[in-house]
Each structure stands twice: as C-alpha cells, then as structure tokens.
Image (spheres, helix red, strand yellow):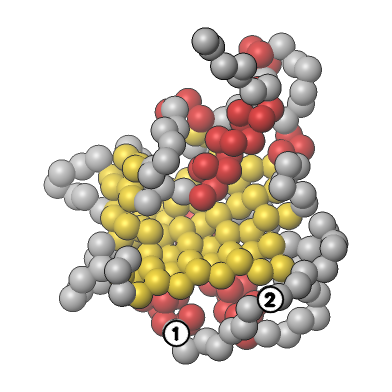
C-alpha cells in the first residue's frame, strides 16, 4: 500500500529545515586537502511561525586536536515566503541557498573562547509574540564529554551577555562568509535523512538575518 505524499510546499519546508539543522559531519572531497569534520559550533535563528519561517544557520566543522586545523563554515538560509503555491511544478523553485567557506583554526578558536565562561539561565516561559526571533547556540568540543546547547526567545532591550556574544559571533561569521575562500565539492552526512543534490543552491546565499 502506497502512502499519500505530502504537498510540495510541505516537502520543501521539511528539506529546508533539514538543511538548516545541518549534517553531523562534512568534509571536502579531496584526499590531499580533507578540510572539515564534526560540527563544533552552530548558531541559528528563526523568525516567524514554524510553518512559515525565515531561517538561517551558520555552523563550523572541523576536527579538534592538539593543533587547530582549518575549518569550514556552512551557511544556509530560507525564506518560506518565496515559495509560491499553486504554480506548475516546472516553475516552482525548491532549491535552498547554501554556502561553504574555509577559515583558519585560530579564527574558530577565538569564537569558541568568546562563549567560554558565559553565565546563562533557562527560560521557563516565553512571550506569545511570533515577531520575536528564536536563537540557538550549540558548542560541541567533545561529543562524549563537552557539549552545550540552548534555544531561546530574544526579547528587545533584554541586555544579556549571551545575546551580545551571539550577535558578535554571528556578524563575524557573516563577514567570513563574504570574504573567506569558497569550499566546493563538500560531502555531508545527515543522521536521519538524505538530501538530494538538487536541493542546494550554491549561487544565491547572502547573509540575511540579524537580531533587532
């Protein structure tokens, strides 16, 4: 018995979210220059409601060791409002803007150190205001021994150090995405899904979202 396939806009949104969450591992397809590795730092933002979001994520992948290796920043952006329903399939744009660039291990180290020693708290309740952005931060320097993740609603004029450091790192990543060397031919490993190659748009990514 064949299951009913979800509508196209639902499948596109699901793919966008999968790309936004990102792979657990990526590496450049070059045995002589295998830059990449595990996701050690990820910043992400969502605006709007979950079924009609604007989403962007910037994550850094490398292999951590005694010496800091070069790393790959992986960025993805999607505006659900660009999807127009009821169009013929051949006119429907389903590709998600992504970009990969190479940075030094020292640059990554500076970003990781900026989050070290921060004090934060858990939000027990949130405002019922879909205009407020939702931010996320994940730092994982050891999957077994050292990882941290937080998702929180950003309230205007809420002057907390985490927001400041997150924003500064986000902007620094945005600058690197515009100036650092592009990495091509990247192989990604997703834990629970498989992304088709034609889902990627390597030409149109631009850093887009920021905190108010």
- Counting from the top left corner in percent of width and height, residue 189 is at 34, 43
Relative to 167, is 101 on the left or the right?
A: left
Disc 1/disc 2 C-alpha distance (Å): 20 Å
- Counting from the top left corner in percent of width and height, residue 68 is at 25, 71
- Counting from the top left corner in percent of width and height, residue 141 is at 33, 71
Give the residue drawn at x 77%, y 51%.
48
Residue 8 vertical placement versus 200 (above, below): above
- The answer to whether the residues at label 1 and label 2 have Cβ atoms under 8 Å apart is no
**Which picture quadrant has residue 143?**
bottom left
Q: Which residue is mark 1?
A: 116
Disc 2 crowd rating (10 Å Cα; few below 14, some 14-19, many 20+) is few
Residue 182 seen from this side: no
Q: Residue furthest front?
A: 1
Relative to 205, is 195 on the left or the right?
A: left
Relative to 15, is 131 on the left or the right?
A: right
Disc 1 crowd rating (10 Å Cα; few below 14, some 14-19, many 20+) is few
- Counting from the top left corner in percent of width and height, residue 22 is at 46, 48
Residue in front for this viewpoint, 182 or 100: 100
Give the residue drawn at x 29%, y 47%.
27
Name the N-terminal-most of marks 1 and 2.
1
Q: Identify the secondary structure beneath mark 1.
A: loop
Relative to 40, is 64 on the left or the right?
A: left
Residue 196 vertical placement versus 88 (above, below): below
Q: Which residue is mark 2?
A: 123
Give the residue drawn at x 62%, y 30%.
12
């Amino acid at each position: 018995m064949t299951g009913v396939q979800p509508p196209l806009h639902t499948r596109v949104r699901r793919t966008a979210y999968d790309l936004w969450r990102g792979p657990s591992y990526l590496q450049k397809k070059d045995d002589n220059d295998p830059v990449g590795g595990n996701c050690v730092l990820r910043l992400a933002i969502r605006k709007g409601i979950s079924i009609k979001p604007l989403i962007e994520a910037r994550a850094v992948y490398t292999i951590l060791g005694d010496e800091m290796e070069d790393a790959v920043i992986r960025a993805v952006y999607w505006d659900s409002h660009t999807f127009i329903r009821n169009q013929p399939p051949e006119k429907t744009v389903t590709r998600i803007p992504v970009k990969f660039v190479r940075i030094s291990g020292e640059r990554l180290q500076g970003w990781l150190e900026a989050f070290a020693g921060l004090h934060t708290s858990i939000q027990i309740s949130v405002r019922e205001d879909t205009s407020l952005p939702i931010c996320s931060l994940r730092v994982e320097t050891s999957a077994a021994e050292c990882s941290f993740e937080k998702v929180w609603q950003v309230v205007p004029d809420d002057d907390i150090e985490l927001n400041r450091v997150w924003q500064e790192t986000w902007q620094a990543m945005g600058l690197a995405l515009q100036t650092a060397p592009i990495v091509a031919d990247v192989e990604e490993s997703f834990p629970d899904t498989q992304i088709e190659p034609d889902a990627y748009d390597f030409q149109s990514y631009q850093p887009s979202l920021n905190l108010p």
